[in-house]
Every structure is written in C-alpha cells, then in structure tokens.
Image (cartoon, rainbow, N blue to C red):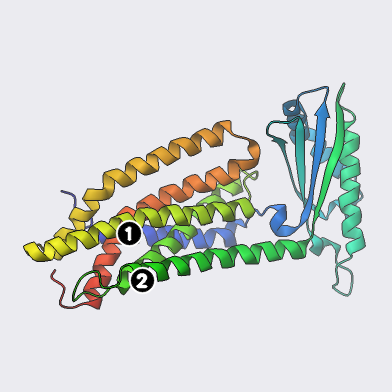
C-alpha cells in the first residue's frame, strides 16, 4: 500500500513550489482583468441577415482593430482590451471594451472623465460604422452598459473579502463540528488544515488561470472567476471533510485496536481515494462538455471550475491528511506514532 504519510514531504514541496509560482505569475505576466474589474463598456447588438458567428469572426480578425485605429490617438490610448462573444439562444452579440482611466489624466493628476466618456462613445460609434460595412448584415445596438472604474474596484474588493470570509467561516465551522472528536486528542488541527488547504486551492487555481489567460486573452479575471472560486471552495471542503471524517472514525477504531497513528491516516486516505477521484472525474466530464459545447460567455467560468476541481482533489488527498498528521503530532505529544 502506497504511504501518503511517508511521502508527504514530496507533496509539500510540490505544493509550495506551485504556490510560489502562482503568487509570482501576476507580478511577472500581469493580470488580465475583465471590464467589471477595471471599468469599461459592454454593448449588445442584435444580428440579422448574417450569422452571428460570421460577425464575431470578422470582428476578431479586423473590425475591432479598425474601429480603434480610426479614433484620434488620445482617444484610442484610453481603449484597452476588446472582446466579443455571442449570446446563447438569440441572434445577439456582446462587445466588451476595457477603459484605462490613467491614460486620461490631466496635468494635475486628476482623471478627465469627459475624455473617458468621449472615448467610450466614440469607440461604440466607430464600431457601428464597421458593422455597417458587412454585406447584407443588419446589426443594431440594443443595450449599452457603462461600468466605472470605481465600481470595478468595489467589485474586486468585495470579491476578495468574500473569498477570505468564506474560508474563515468554513474553518470555524470545522472547529465546531470536530470538537471532542477523540478523547485526549486536540481538534484545532482539523480547522487549521481546512483553512490552509482552501488557501492552497485558491492560490494555485488563480495562478494557473493567470498563466492560461496570458496566452489566451479571452479568459479574464472577472466576477465569473470569483464566483467559480467560491464554488470551488464549497466543492473542495466537501471532499476534504469526507477524508477527515474517515480519519476521525478510523482513529477511534484504531485507538481501540492499537493501530499506529501513521497507519490509520494512510488507511483513511485509501478508503476515500476512489470516491474522491471518481467524483472529481464525473465533475470534470460535465465541465469539459460545458467548456467545449457551452456558450462563449461561460468558458472562463468553466475553466476556473476545472482548475479548482483538479487542485482541490489533489489537496484533499495529498495535502490535507498528511498535514493533519503532522499538526496532530505537534499538538498532542501523547498521540501514538
């Protein structure tokens, strides 16, 4: 039987390296943020006369760039990311354009909001002209959403606070749920391990997503990503609790039978590993179907869920239980090795 406890240092080193690289990537590659984080405009168009896939292809290949190039230099400097995708179920497309307000600062350091609004409106008008050049196409603007940078900062701050708050809340619940689990054994390691593994999952999933978004700019850090990470926390803790609950149960039986602590932990991991892997594989099959056959608007969300599921499964099996072993030993010297 493979010993996860005996090889735990390898898992620790691998996890620490991944976390270090994940924290380093945003500083080296930058973070590709969506307009709901940075501010910008989201414009919806109805499409008639041609397929929306044809319009999206033309826009990505030339029309978006032509629209920006037709603007004055001081206006085009404010326009940053441009993205276009179809709306599922209807003949509509959505164009998202990021805005860099720092490029519209005046000599005194304040932002010229008149210039910012002019850039948004000018780009929308220029893009409409480009759409009008498509033969037999009738493309009309049906919705215009203006997102300010201050609102983006609020969304970003709220998202990060939500992630941290959820991790703390889950850890406190685990501390309560596992109280008095085993006579003579401390229970705080269950809570601490929960918090550490959840932070591990979010950090590595974030780093991998940043790396992918560097090569594929259509994947952005936005509210969908934060929602995906919150979902991953719920999924990951469910997997981790199954492992820890089996450890608690086996420790009770193991103490009665005189089994070594290390053996009990390893047996607990092997008892649950098939369940964890099969559950994660089932989830990944569904997510892969959504990623390849679902609408473009949720591909980033689905990708974040896939990364989180893979990382969460690894941490539940290879990190949580071995870390619990080390913490219980350090917190309770009377525990048998």
- Compared with residue 136, is residue 123 higher up or lower down, i.e. above or below? below
**Kind of element beneath mark 1:** helix
Q: Is residue 207 above or below residue 279?
A: below
- In the rendered image, the quadrant that contains the C terminus is bottom left
Please say if the residues under marks 1 and 2 sit with CB atoms less than 8 Å apart. no
Work out which residue is located at the far left of the displayed protein and give it: 257
In the image: residue 314, left or right of residue 26: left
Crowd class of label 1 (few under 14; some 14 to 19; many from 20; radius 10 Å): many
In this rendering, does residue 221 appear at all? no
Q: Position of residue 61 (x, y in %)?
A: 75, 33
What residue sits 25% from the left and 77% below the top? 331
Q: Label 2 belongs to which residue?
A: 176
Please give left or right for residue 157 compared with residue 82 in the image.
Answer: left
Task: Return the mark for residue 319.
Answer: 1
Q: Is residue 85 left or right of residue 219?
A: right
Q: Residue at x 46, y 57 (%)?
A: 233
């Amino acid at each position: 039987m493979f010993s996860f406890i005996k090889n735990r240092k390898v898992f620790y080193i691998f996890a620490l390296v991944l976390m270090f690289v994940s924290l380093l990537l945003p500083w080296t590659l930058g973070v590709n943020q969506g307009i709901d984080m940075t501010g910008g405009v989201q414009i919806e168009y109805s499409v008639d006369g041609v397929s929306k896939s044809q319009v999206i292809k033309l826009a990505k290949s030339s029309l978006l760039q032509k629209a920006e190039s037709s603007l004055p230099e001081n206006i085009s400097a404010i326009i940053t990311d441009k993205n276009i995708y179809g709306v599922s179920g209807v003949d509509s497309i959505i164009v998202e354009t990021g805005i860099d307000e720092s490029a519209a600062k005046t000599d005194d350091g304040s932002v010229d909001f008149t210039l910012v609004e002019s850039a948004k409106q000018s780009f929308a008008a220029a893009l409409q002209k480009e759409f009008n050049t498509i033969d037999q196409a009738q493309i009309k603007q049906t919705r215009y959403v203006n997102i300010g940078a201050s609102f983006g900062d609020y969304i970003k701050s709220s998202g990060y606070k939500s992630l941290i708050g959820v991790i703390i809340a889950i850890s406190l619940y685990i501390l309560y749920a596992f109280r008095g689990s085993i006579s003579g054994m401390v229970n705080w390691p269950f809570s601490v391990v929960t918090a550490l593994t959840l932070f591990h999952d979010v950090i590595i999933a974030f780093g991998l997503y940043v790396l992918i978004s560097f090569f594929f700019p259509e994947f952005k850090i936005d509210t969908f990503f934060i929602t995906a990470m919150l979902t991953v926390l719920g999924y990951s803790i469910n997997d981790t609790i199954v492992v820890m609950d089996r450890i608690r149960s086996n420790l009770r039986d193991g103490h009665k039978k005189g089994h070594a602590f290390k053996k009990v932990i390893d047996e607990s991991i092997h008892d649950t590993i098939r369940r964890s892997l099969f559950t994660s594989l089932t989830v990944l099959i569904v997510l892969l179907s959504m990623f390849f056959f679902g609408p473009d608007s949720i591909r980033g969300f689905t990708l974040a869920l896939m990364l989180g599921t893979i990382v969460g499964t690894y941490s539940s099996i290879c990190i949580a239980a071995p870390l619990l072993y080390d913490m219980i030993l350090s917190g309770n010297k009377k525990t048998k090795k």
